[in-house]
Amino acid sequence: MHTGEMVKQSLPLLILCGFGAILTWSTLSGMTEILESIPGLIVVIPGVIAMRGNISTALGSRLGSAYHLGLIDVDNLWNNDLKQNILGSLVLSVLVSIIIGFLAYLTSLLLNVSPDPLKLILIVLLGGVSSAIILTSLTIGIVYVVFKKGYDPDNITGPTLATIGDIITMLCILGSAYLVEVIL
Amino acid sequence: MYDWRIIVRNGLPLLTVTASIEIIAGQILQSGEKLLVSIPLLLVCIPVINSVGGNLGSILGARLASALHLGSVEVTLRDPQLRENIIVALLIGLITYFILAIGIYLFAVFIGIEAGDVDVLEFMGIVVLTGLLLSCIVILVSVLTALVSFRRGVDPDDMVAPVVTTTGDIMGILFFFILLQIFGVGV
């Protein structure tokens, strides 16, 4: 465990990721109005972001393993193994979104904030599922390009998804909140 | 070979646990919502502080996991190499938070994010001190998670990242609010 290499390799990466995070999260400064008008919305944001990150990195790393096991490759990408993986991620997104919306509503009630349960669950569900569809398509696109170039997907999918995943998820929550606010 | 039902069954328990903990983080955010919404600069820097904390803990945990697998580090807190790594990680955290504090403030001024009556020195003090406290916690949690899971025969690579990022998310927000109080922001 040489500490010199940690300074040389990790410090620049940490700072770079930090600046990436500044760009992503400055979008929050444009959300203050909608955060105020929908009680409970701020509660679900950390949960949805964490869920999206966990589900997409798991999908990316499963597809990496599937490639190494020879189950999928560039000529045989759109097969049953890939479809099962996509379906699994989407079902997880729907279930965990509902859980997040429901828990946010319940805990808010306990703390004497009363959000509209239907609104909150609908926003999380729409945001969670739309970001799942976008990020899953993106993952498959990345995996396809990585296969074509002959790289190891394990080295590419994780960091790429982590970097663009947060901003896409934030925009999906924001979009859903506006949409639900207009409809309901 | 893959079956969507098995993917759902394997993923759901851990996802439910992390979602529940993140809801606690969200509720702490909601308790300070008025202040955060009136000074969006503060709202924007919380996820940045947390993401650096999560990355720092995950890097240290991944390094420690590899060293444990290779047997180059003893499974005890008295190991001198482990101590050196902890100190270096803490220094890296400090430098990163110092640079990012300046970066966030400059970027906020540049794109016109409202900073309220928080001046640059006050802001840097809050961010760097939150970062220092958070670094201590994520380092502690990451080392303990790696050591305990290794001793119990669980692969530390599977455990450290989710545990460190979820505890980091809660502690980061808590420390941030405590420092806002100490600096008297929004009082």
Image: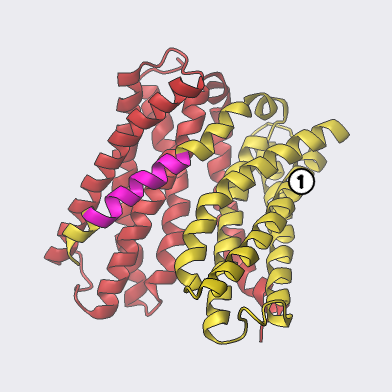
Q: Circle 1: is it few (<14), some (14-19), or many (20+) Cα within 10 Å?
A: many
Residue sitting at 62 percent across and 85 percent down? Answer: A71
Up the image or down, B50 lies above or below B123; here it is: below
In the displayed structure, would residue A3 be above or below residue B26? below
Picture layout, residue A110 above or below residue A99: above
Looking at the rendering, the stretch of residues picked out in magenta corresponds to A8-21
Scheme by which the image is coloured: by chain
Residue B23 in sight in this render: no
Horizontal placement of A137 versus A27: left or right? right
Q: Is residue A28 left or right of residue A125?
A: left
Residue B165 visible, this orientation: yes
Q: In which quarter of the view is residue B106 placed? A: top left
Chain yellow in the figure, letter: A
Q: Amino acid at mark 1?
A: Ile
Front-most of residues A86 and B137: A86
Q: Where in the figure is residue B179, as x and y percent of width and height? A: 36, 28
Give the residue at the far front of this rendering: A149
The C terminus of chain A lies in quadrant: top right
> Is B92 a magenta residue?
no
| Chain identity for the colour red used in the image | B
Q: Which residue is mark 1?
A: A121
State the residue lying farthest toward the left.
Answer: B80
Q: Say which residue appears at 44% left-offset and 68% top-offset.
A: A155
Question: Residue B162: x percent and y percent?
Answer: 47, 60
Q: Residue at x 25, y 40 (%)?
A: B95
At horizontal 57% and vertical 87% (from top left) the residue drawn is A70
Residue A86 against residue B123 in the figure, above or below:
below
B101 or B144, which is in the foreground? B101
Tell me the chief SS of the magenta region: helix
Picture coordinates of residue A135, whole percent (x, y): 65, 57
Which element type, helix, strand or loop, lies under badge 1?
helix
